[in-house]
Amino acid sequence: MVLDARDDSDCPTNERKGLNMPQYWNEVIGRQFVTAIQTLRNAIDACPDGLWDERTDGTPFWHIAYHALFYCDFYLSDEEKAFQAPDYHVDHNHYLPGDYKEFGGIVTTPAQCYTKQQMLEYADHCTGKCRGVFEALTEQRAKQRCGFWWYKLNVGEFLINSLRHTQHHAAQLALILRRRANLGVDWLGTEDNQPPPPTW
């Protein structure tokens, strides 16, 4: 494969000179992960009150948002035992209906929904945690087996896997907003709407 050799000296990720490749990719991937979380947060913030817990057309908006944020937070932990769930978490509330066949199809949306403010604050928590993870990530650590036995991935690829999960549900929520409320979620990445520069 031949890569484009255009001059990219004005790219934000190249402003810090002297980065070796592992440091460079920490910034690039970490920056995109934070942006995926912010996209999810923007969708949450845009959701009208009447759609937040609407259940007539399947899983409500808030439950998908919580699922995405919970697993973002969970998989940014070093291992399962190191994870601290939010104070308001109730067992199985992070599972979505229709998934997790091991439970025999008994997973349902909880009767009591979480608030938009709780989800916005949770997104901010995930953003901060993500920055901390990539700030501390070393090449050696990236090559180690991740701390979740059901994933046979090293830490580096596992973080990209988690990024994809976050963006998957951000896109799902954006589609719900477009179809049910005719609202759009801005794309973060254009010249006028760049993702934030890395802070590490």
Image: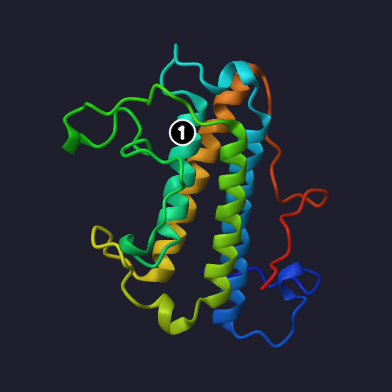
Which residue corresponds to the image point at 46% horizontal and 47% vertical from the top-left? 86
CA neighbours of label 1 inside 10 A, class few (<14), some (14 to 19), many (20+)? many
Q: Which of the 4 image quarters holds residue 8?
A: bottom right
Residue ID for mark 1: 64
> In this image, 113 relative to 121: left or right?
left
Residue 138 to residue 192: above or below: below
Looking at the rendering, which quadrant does residue 92 occupy? top left
Q: Position of residue 105 (x, y in %)?
A: 21, 27
For this view, does 135 lie left or right of residue 92? right
Q: Residue furthest top?
A: 56
Q: Residue at the spot x=39%, y=70% of the render?
A: 155
**Which amino acid type is shown beneath numbered disc 1?**
Ile
For image coordinates 39% across by 67% down, the residue present is 78
Q: Look at the picture and state if 70 lies above or below 101.
A: below
Name the quadrant of the C terminus: bottom right
Q: Residue at x 45, y 31 (%)?
A: 63
| Total tally of numbered discs in the picture | 1
* Residue 62 place in picture, x, y as percent: 51, 30
Q: Residue 67 at x, y = what percent?
A: 43, 39
Q: Foreground: 91 or 193?
A: 91
Location of residue 52 with respect to 189 vertically, above or below:
above
Q: Position of residue 125 (x, y in %)?
A: 58, 53
